[in-house]
Amino acid sequence: MNKNSVLLLRFAGMFGVVGAILGAHMAGSGSYAFRPVHAHILVVGWLSLFAWAVYYKVFPTAEGIVTKVHVWSAIIGSVGLTVGMWLYMVKPFELPEAITLICYIGGGVALLASFIAFFLLTLFYREKK
């Protein structure tokens, strides 16, 4: 069993459920306030994490620092970006804008790091022995 694949797959499933619930809420309420959050949950949360889970299953990758950085920055970045976006755009709580912006940008930076790490993994792919 590939631990990275399973971990990413479980988080992808979680994002899929949350994205579907948000979509159902928007359809039922007639309010599209969550549209950008919903889109990012499904694209960076469900789709990207699922694609990376498949990658680790199809291409058994040697467990190294870049792999660990990729997996954890993908998870932290997906959660951070979407929660930060929700806090910043929807404003469900009366938090200082600086706090919500830090969450939003921090999540985005972590997600960007995961995409860079993934690109490096594909460039220097070594099959697990």
Image (spheres, rainbow, N blue to C red):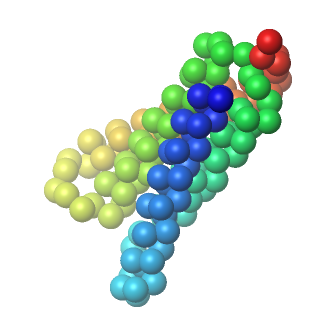
Q: Quadrant of the C terminus?
A: top right
Q: Position of residue 79 (x, y in %)?
A: 43, 44
Q: Can residue 105 be seen by looking at this rendering?
A: no
Which residue is at the far left?
Answer: 94
Location of residue 40 with respect to 1 vertically, above or below: below
Q: Is residue 58 left or right of residue 25?
A: right
Q: Position of residue 25 (x, y in %)?
A: 39, 77
Residue at the spot 64% in from the left edge and 21% down from the top edge: 67
Residue closer to the observer: 93 or 64 = 64
Residue closer to the observer: 84 or 101 = 84
| Residue 8, picture quadrant | top right
Q: Position of residue 91 (x, y in %)?
A: 27, 61
Which residue is at the far front?
Answer: 1
Residue closer to the observer: 32 or 29 = 29
| Residue 33, picture quadrant | bottom left
Q: Is residue 104 left or right of residue 87?
A: right
Residue at the spot 43% in from the left edge and 69% down from the top edge: 21
Residue closer to the observer: 14 or 66 = 14
Residue at the spot 76% in from the left edge and 25% down from the top edge: 60
Q: Can residue 75 be seen by looking at this rendering?
A: yes
Location of residue 100 with respect to 68 vertically, above or below: below
Numbered-mark total: 0
Q: Position of residue 50 (x, y in %)?
A: 64, 47
Q: Is residue 32 left or right of residue 64?
A: left
Q: Quadrant of the N terminus?
A: top right
Residue at the spot 27% in from the left edge and 43% down from the top edge: 98
